[in-house]
Amino acid sequence: MKTKRTQLTPTINRLWAEMQEFINSAYRDGSGTNNPEPLLKDYAKNQSWTDALGKLLDAETVNERQHRNGRPQEWKAPMSNVTAAKLILLGNFADGSEAKEMYPATIFLQWRHTAAEMSVVGCLCRGKAKISDEWRAEVRAIDYAKLMASSYR
């Protein structure tokens, strides 16, 4: 699966913007799972002094940079660290938005913090943000592992 950065990045950025709208919608609704209004405030755009989604993206970008450290010189990244971090977080959000019940607190001990946090945000948005199965399928169709594996030339 050879994909040029120029083709992949706009799609991931669009999906990221759509995810931001799902979060905003669930925040504005305020009647979703566990009354998410106060819980999503820091993730909703322009609602708080804190940009929790931006901090989460920054932390996952650092994780991605560390993951790539030590790759062979001939390896060419199919996307930037930031774009890869967005893709990973989009997958976590999509998974969380399909969870049947809220995740237990122990996921923060078992999973990488960014994965756990984004899964919980997705779970808080389920049912109120009108996240379609088509959107989830589009996120999952961009396979991070295959992209990374195909980057050896």
Image (spheres, rainbow, N blue to C red):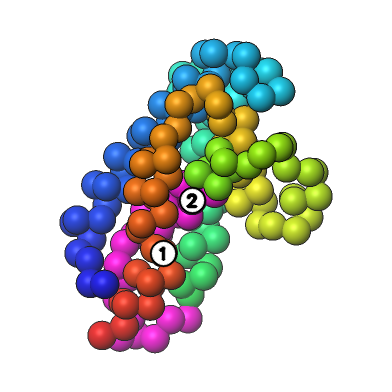
Residue at 37% across, 33% down: 18
Q: Residue at x 42, y 44 (%)?
A: 136
Q: Position of residue 133 (x, y in %)?
A: 42, 40
Question: N-terminal of the two: label 1 or label 2?
Answer: 2
Query: What percent of the width, then of the height, locates residue 51?
Result: 53, 30
Q: Which mark is residue 91?
A: 2
Image quadrant where one finds the C terminus: bottom left
Foreground residue, 77 or 87?
A: 87
| Amino acid type of the residue that numbered disc 2 sits on in the rendered structure | Gly
User: Label 1 is placed on what type of residue?
Assistant: Tyr
| Residue 81 part of the magenta-drawn span | yes
Establish if 95 lies above or below 48.
below
Q: Is residue 131 visible?
A: yes
Residue that carries the numbered disc 1 in the rendered image: 144
Q: Secondary structure at mark 2?
A: helix
| Mark linked to residue 83 | none
- Eyeballing the image, is 146 above or below 113? below
Looking at the rendering, the stretch of residues picked out in magenta corresponds to 70-92
Please state which of residues 29 and 79 is positioned toward the viewer in this rendering: 29
Q: Circles 1 and 2: CB distance less than 8 Å?
A: yes
Q: How many marks?
A: 2
Residue 81, horizontal then vertical, whole percent: 40, 59
